[in-house]
Image (tube, rainbow, N blue to C red):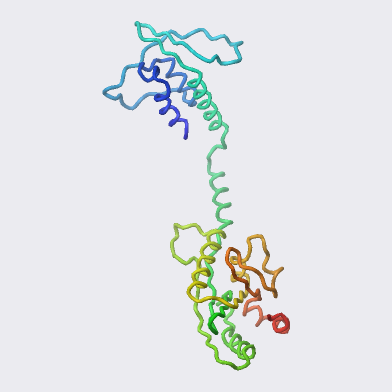
Amino acid sequence: MDAIDLYTNHMSIDQKVRNAPMNELQRQVYLAALGIENYAPRWLLPSALPSVACVLPIVDSSQEQITTSLTIRCVANEPIVELSGSSLNLLSAIAELGEQKKSSVPVNAATILQQLKENSASVVQPFSLSVYRPKPGFLIIDSRNTHLALPTDLFLHNFLRSYFKNSHFTLDDEVLRWPLIENRFVSRTETDARNELQTWLAVENELRPIEALWLMGESASRYWLAADMDWLSVCWSTQSIDGLPLSAFILPSLNELLQKPAQKAILWASLP
């Protein structure tokens, strides 16, 4: 609730204040608490009572504590308005809120550019993954990099043919692109990518129960592992999937295996 809401809702707190017309001293107290020096209404409501001039009391500057009640006597035989202790507490809260607004950081071009820079640093750029289902219950997710133009499908086919000992398998490549919904007005942080991809994997497991899962490369691993886990430190090992009752074998991507043939020996030695 901001200061304007407090100013508006206060009229329903004290019955005496609600039944009496607003006088100039009350008006000045509220405006001072809101941090408004000069105020002129745009229009007057038809049923609004006119402001009444008041005789301002002499305030002792040495007084440090606010009394629990304040009596305001208006001229022209207007009614006496008493502010209770709860009303004064509300005014104090409004004054504190006004002070917080005054002490806030000013908005200028430099702060706006700084905020834009900080927000852009946390945005995850769109990426795509290759999804393979060589056998029922076996799911392979690989980090794609089409700029390298390496024969990743042929390499995976030859590797699986040796891994499955020439048994029948299929190798249809399905491209999984993130963000899953192309909408430039939707945020694209790492948390968003993690939530969407974990939801996708949970649905995939419901439709086709997963018995073996290989995550190959950084993009295919980091969003399904725990947020504080570095995929390089757990590469060549089996790790639990964050938020799902699944485990995955973490591997380098197919592109990385083709670029570093020495890792093929580590791959064969690490297979579960």
Viewer-closest of 254 and 168: 168
Where residue 105 sits: x, y (%)?
57, 37
Q: Is the residue 75 above or below the residue 42 in the image?
A: above
Looking at the image, which residue is at 55% across and 37% down? Answer: 106
x and y percentages locating residue 240 in the rendered image? 64, 68
Location of residue 25 in the rendering, given as x and y in whole percent from the top left corner: 44, 15
Q: Residue furthest bottom?
A: 166
Whether residue 229 is situated above or below residue 61 in the rendered picture: below
How many marks the image carries: the answer is: 0
What residue is at 39 percent from the left and 20 percent from the top?
15
Residue at horizontal 47%, vertical 34%?
2
Position of the C terminus, as image quadrant, is bottom right
Q: Which residue is at 44% across, 65% downward?
A: 182
Q: Position of residue 154 (x, y in %)?
A: 58, 88
- Between 126 and 92, the residue placed more toward the observer is 92
With respect to residue 165, does 46 lie above or below?
above
The quadrant in which residue 244 appears is bottom right
